[in-house]
Every structure is written in C-alpha cells, then in structure tokens.
Image (tube, grey):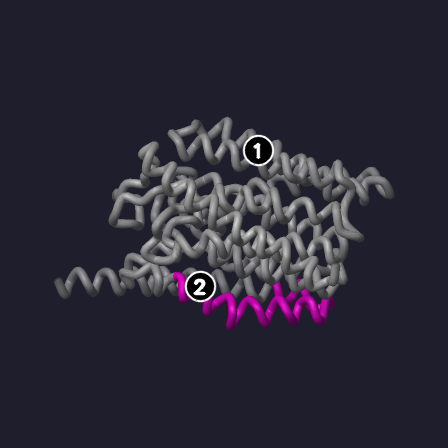
Amino acid sequence: MSVAAVLIVPALCAFAISIVVVVASLAYAHRRGLLDQPGQRRSHAQPTPRGGGVGIVIAVLLCAMPWLTVLPGGWPPANVIVLSLALLAVAAVGWRDDHGGLPALPRFAVHLLASIAVGAVLLWPFAQVDPKAWAWLIAIALVFTGSINAHNFMDGIDAILSLQALFVLSGYALLAHDLGATALTAACLASAAACLGFLLFNLPPARIFMGDVGSGTLGLLIATLAGLLVQRAPALLWPCAILASAFVADAAMTLASRVLAQKRWYTAHREHLYQWLARAGGSHAKTDGAYVLWNLIIVAPAAWAAARWSAYGLVLCAAVYALSAATWWFGKRACLHAMRDARHAA
C-alpha cells in the first residue's frame, strides 16, 4: 500500500464512521431526551441534543489509534492499548455525565488517572535512560487533566471546539509528516477527519452538541498526540503549544480572572472571550469565524516558524501567548462596551 493510501484510507474511514455514529446518536438523544435546554448560563436558544461527540470517540478508537502500532515506526501495542483505554475512560465518564449530573470529584479522579496513564507511556522511553524523568509525571498529568477540562469549558457555542480540534489535529499531522512519522501522521489525520464528520452536524445552527463525551476526550487526545510528537522530537513542544494557543489562552485568562475576582471558577459560566463575542455580536458563526481567522493568520504562521527555526521556538511561543492574552483583555472590554452601548440605545 502506498504512503498516500496509508494516510487517506484511515482518514476516510474515520470520517464515515463519525457521520454514521453521530446520526445514530441524534436518534438516541431524541429518544432518551438528552437535550441541552436554553438558560442563563447557556449560549443557545433552542433545546438541542447532546452527546454527538461519541462519533468522534468511536472513529478515533477504531481508525486512529490502531495505526499508531500497525504502521512502521509506531509504538508497542501495549502502549497504544493504554492510550486507548485512557481515552475510553474519559469518554465513559463524559457519557455518564451527559446522561445526568455527575459529581465533580469522580470526574476529576478519572481525568487524573487517565492523564497519569498517558504520562507514564510518554515518559517511559526517557525513564529507561534516566529514572529521574519520572519526576515529570505529576506535572504532565496535571497539564493533561487541565487540557481535558479546558476543552470541556471551551465547548460552549456551535462548532467552536470541532473547528479548533480540526485545526490543531491537522497541524499536528503536518508536523508528524515533516518528521517522517507515518504512523503518527495517519493517526492525526484520522482524528481530524473524525472531527470533520461531526462538524457537519455541529455548524451553526447546530443539530447536535458534542457533550462531555466528546469535549473531554478531545482535550486528552490533543494533549496525547502532542506528547507523542514531543516524545519523538522535543523541539516540537513549542509548535504544538502554539497550535493549541487560542483555546489555552482563552481558558487560562478566564480562569485567572475568575480566581482573582473570587468567583467559583469551577462552576458553569459565560465569561470566556468566545462567549462574550457571541453575546456582543449575536452570532455563533461570526465568533467561530474570528477564531478560525486568528488561527490562520496568527497561529499557523507562528507554529510553522517555530517548527522551521526551532532555536526561536520558545520566543515565538511566548510572543503568541502574550498577544493572545492582550487580545483577550482588549476583546472582553470591547464586548462590554458594545453591550453597554446596545442597552443604552434600546
């Protein structure tokens, strides 16, 4: 089989499986009454089915993860099984939460344990050379747990997470291809294709929401694939961090502002920049477009430069995050002024 076929076939399979499962989940959600109702802390106006992210999960587990061990240059089967089980555990607790409120403690415990398992797989090659590498395990686990919850919080308007994941995973695929890592390239492309299949049903106005089953799993998947890239080439840490910067910066700045304001940061809210933009502009599509443009105009060139000139990776990464933080600060204030002006005009 040619290299092109090795990359295209799993992506096409993931795309098709995602569509089929999302269609089935639509029928299931209507039958079980799994509907997100509009509310003060919600950004939608109509009851909408949730849980469609299960299509992404199943497509990734069937079409992306196996290629990490089947293709030359991949990982041992035991490692890939651990990664798959970690993704499945996060998906399962998200699926349970989508069916009814699940306390935060068991959700966090599953997220942390899954992140520890992935971190152990990533650190194993380094720990064989230097056992002190295990000292990084808790830090990696906390970062990965943060990624799970950040992507969950950022999944608040139509298509924003599926578009972001499609962008990031496609970028990872390009980085993996430049490394000559065929197995990782195929897994990243298949994961991106799974997101694209779901996106067809999630574009504004969304026919179905991703739910925790999809958002949390994507948070761990994105962190895991970045970890596999960095395991192969440590200098890719900075391009990977840049590719994910739009969501990481928004989530981090929002969290910091809520903590400083002594608010309950762990509860549902509408204080991320994308939520302010959606309310100020009144359109999910316009907000999605703003994030897509930001990724294409700012993030993608910076990630390419960081991969091309690795010596400047840290500087470029810091510059992108600084610019993102400034944009968050000024953007939120612009939204507040726009909303205040609209109220006065009314």
Question: Residue at the location (51% across, 42% down)?
Answer: 216
Is residue 346 shown above or below 87?
below
User: Residue flagged by tag 1: what amino acid is it?
Assistant: Ala
Q: Nearer the viewer, residue 227 or 31?
A: 31
Predominant secondary structure, magenta span: helix
Question: Residue at the location (34% across, 59% down)?
Answer: 284
How far apart are labels 2 and 1 at the CA level?
A: 30 Å
Q: Residue furthest right?
A: 129
Check if mark 2's residue and mark 1's residue have beta carbons within 8 Å.
no
User: Residue flagged by tag 2: what amino acid is it?
Assistant: Tyr
In the rendered image, is residue 248 in sight?
no
Q: Element type at marker 1?
A: helix
Q: Is residue 4 left or right of residue 301?
A: right
> Is residue 44 shown in magenta?
no
Q: Residue furthest left?
A: 346
Q: Is residue 188 left or right of residue 296?
A: right
Q: Position of residue 254 (x, y in %)?
A: 43, 51
Q: Position of residue 315 (x, y in %)?
A: 65, 66
Q: Position of residue 171 (x, y in %)?
A: 60, 62
Disc number placed over residue 89 in the picture, else none: 1
Residue on which disc 2 sits: 291
Q: Position of residue 57 (x, y in %)?
A: 54, 43
| Bounds of the magenta segment | 288-317
Q: In terms of image quadrants, where is residue 52? A: top left
In the rendered image, is residue 282 in sight?
yes
Q: Residues within 10 Å of mark 2 (few under 14, many from 20)?
A: some
